[in-house]
Image (tube, helix red, strand yellow):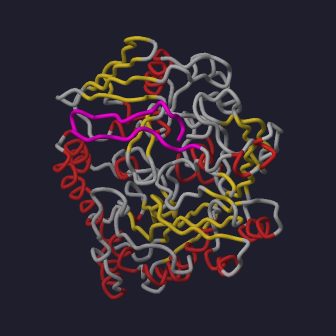
Amino acid sequence: MRSQIKHVAATVAASVVLVACSAGAGSDPAESDPAASDGETTDQALSLGLVAEPANLDFTTTDGAAIPQALLYNVYEGLVQVNQDGEIEGGLAESWDVSKDGITYTFQLVDNATFSNGEPFTAEDAKFSIDRVKSDWTVSLKAAMDVVDQVEVVSPTELKVTLKQPSNDWLYRMTTRVGAMFSKSGVDDLANDPVGTGPYDVQKWTRGDSIDLTRNDDYWAEEPYFETVTLKYFKDPTALNNALLSGTIDVIGTVQTPESLEQFEDNDEYQVIEGTTNGEVVLSFNNESGPLQNTEVRQAVRHAIDHQALVDTCWAGRGELIGSMVPPTDPWYEDLTDAYPYDPEKAEQLLGDSGQAGQTLRLRIPTLPYAVACGTVVKSQLEQVGFKVELDQLEFPAAWLTTVFEDADYDMSIVAHVEPRDMSAVFGDPKYYTRYGKPEFRDLLSEADQASSDEQVAIMQDAARMLSEDAAADWLFLLPNLIVAEADVTGLPENAISESFDVTALGRS
């Protein structure tokens, strides 16, 4: 448990009881290490191997999942957070009430939290953090705070947030990076010096290699097990596997070569965790320009992809087919894999009817293992039905973010969107790199956000079907959560359904 003072919080509007936050130490140091019970200092360190290194440490101005993966819940905390079951729990808020009209949220905050710069956390900081999303953030996810009308400080430990209209989505967004709490005096150099209330602080960032986190001895809740956690980044998946085999790291946080799992599954020195994620591997289309602004071309691409063969070839069959931008862990999931079945003859016909058969599609992918492995399969399958495909690998994050994400200078790309409930973010904004954002789709999103809970599910299903029928993208598969670790590491997450790799739950047996 992060804090023993956290308790049950009731949301009046939804009449749902929410259990307060729980994400603390994976085990008790005194139980794991006899020396700890004698008051002796022990050096408990963990090294975690990851793939996508952050471009910087400021997720308020830089898109991408790598920064919150490292910092959210570990360095930064929010008023609320999401647990392994996708339920909202308390963080820096002990409890909260929602008015009957669903517009006013009143949060009761913890009274003993401090930032890593020594400043106390109060409702003033919470107001500052929420307001700052609208005033200073530049990333597209800031739109989640547009629904907020007013933030009031009632007392140092009580905050009142008034929305412009009821929103089913807003509290959930507060569990993501958008809800991170910042110190009013600690935002001068977020790219290099994050200041949060979390159980860890960034001690050192060695660019191109690792981020070192150290345990915050003044942390307001229960301290995590490990004194230091090193997030070590590998561009080569073989080097990542070898680092675990050689003892250089203790955990592979994101397995990049599923076929390599056999060497760990039959070895008692290691454990293999396999669960699910939010990570939709999207074959994204530029809906605004180039050949893929043509609906028949997009439909032809979808019919040309043999998704099961692709997963079997490039991800050792470990991915789940979903057919939409909604993973099975979301309430409005529907299996839409049959919407565009593999049909090469239909693909050829649609391509011919489109008048775009001679055009070359620029498939520009990031240099991430899943994208590289699957990119060659996509290229081959499309060429088999008559497409011309030019495959380019762009360095990730810098080159891909600039060329594809920011400039939309591409026709197709492949990237895993791992942010939770991200259908609206990826397709609801016509300025986002997919360049979709059709008015009727956005109207559905707005309607769903203000509807009752039951109505929200049905409307969001309608929105997902619209995306699929319009072939706004192709959804290759859902990434599994594949983790390999030394056998004595405890607290590893079965599912990865938040933006954070929460190291605070980890320990040793």
Q: Is residue 494 left or right of residue 33?
A: left
The quadrant holding residue 375 is bottom right
Q: Is residue 114 left or right of residue 417?
A: right
- Residue 169 screen position, x and y as percent: 31, 41
Residue found 52% across the figure and 74% down from its top? 389
The region drawn magenta spans 1-24
Residue found 38% across the figure and 43% down from its top? 88
- Residue 290 screen position, x and y as percent: 43, 61
Q: Is residue 101 above or below residue 470?
A: above
Q: Is residue 23 left or right of residue 201?
A: left
> Which quadrant is home to the C terminus?
bottom right
The quadrant holding residue 117 is top right
Secondary structure of the magenta portion, mostly?
loop
Q: Is residue 29 left or right of residue 420?
A: right
Q: 347 or 291: nearer the eye?
A: 347
Per the image, is 94 magenta?
Answer: no
Per the image, is 23 magenta?
Answer: yes
Q: 274 or 466: nearer the eye?
A: 274
